[in-house]
Image: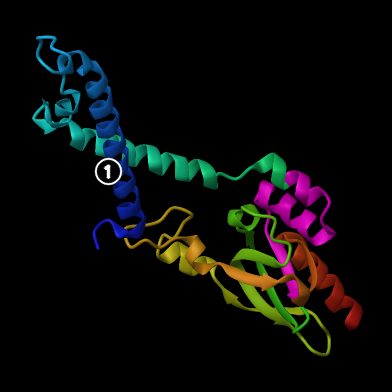
Amino acid sequence: MLLGSHGIKFVVRGVLFVLVIWVFLYVFSFFLNIPTYFGSNYQPFELQKYLIMDILEVKAYSLLIAIGSILACQTELNKKKIDVPRIHQEMSGANNIVSLLFSAMNSQTPVKVSLKSKKVYVGIVDGTQFSSADLENVVIIPYLSGYRDKDRLHIIFDCNYLPVYQKYNISHSEDEDGLSLKYFRNVIRVSEIESISLFDMKYFDDFERVTETENK
């Protein structure tokens, strides 16, 4: 379907917008024509006919449908805008995990999420995480994933997503196939998280070397 369900919804609202205007013009014409019903001799008003006038070879009602559709679309977008102050206020009273995620999202700093299952993810917190005060899930765009060794508990990364993103030029903006980083989002339940922290590979390598030295 060319327009899709959302597009059709906006067009229908545009048509309704034109119908409301038509009814208004018809009723207004009726009141202007009241004197003619009592014998006054003048050309009756038919304002609703202006809707079928040609404006630059386009019917006036077609332009009004387009305007109504655009207004409906803009209204829908305004409703979905993230109210940052409200979300920030709600997050300030949330637990430490969500507060850290909020900070990481604002600074675009990667986070390391360790699960109770020993699975580990490193990635950027997705901005839609805070489109509502969802405190039960963590949404990240993964850069690395792996697991903790069951004996020594050090992290082994066995999947690097970054080369794939670079190879196919995948970014935050959708490409011609509609593919973006959001396609790779990973939703993790907070109840499954064992620990979470900001992540920097440079310092991570240093800590890993310290751990290996101590274990020798």
Magenta stretch in the rendered image: 88-114
* Quadrant in the rendering for residue 48: top left
Seen at 68% across and 47% down, the residue is 106
- Tell me which amino acid carries mark 1: Val
Q: As rendered, which of 194 and 149 lies closer to the eye?
A: 194
Compared to residue 88, the image places residue 182 above or below, namely below
Residue 211 x %, y %: 86, 75
| 113 lies above or below 90 | below
**Residue 84 falls in image quadrant:** top right
Residue at the image position 60 percent from the left and 58 percent from the top = 126
Q: Residue 47: x percent and y percent? A: 19, 23
State the residue lying farthest toward the right.
214
User: Would you say 60 lies left or right of 160 here?
Assistant: left
Q: Which residue is mark 1?
A: 15
* Dominant secondary-structure state across the stretch colored magenta: helix
94 or 174, nearer to the observer: 94
Question: Where is residue 100, by image quadrant?
Answer: bottom right
Q: Nearer the viewer, residue 171 or 149?
A: 171
Q: Is residue 82 magenta?
A: no
Instruction: Please name whichever residue, 207 or 190, is drawn nearer the observer in this view of the structure.
Output: 190
Q: Residue furthest front?
A: 38
Q: Residue at x 79, y 79 (%)?
A: 154
Instruction: Quarter of the image for the C terminus: give it.
Output: bottom right
- Does dot 1 land on a helix, a strand or a loop? helix
Q: Is residue 2 above or below residue 145?
A: above
Residue 158 spot, x, y in % from top left: 62, 80
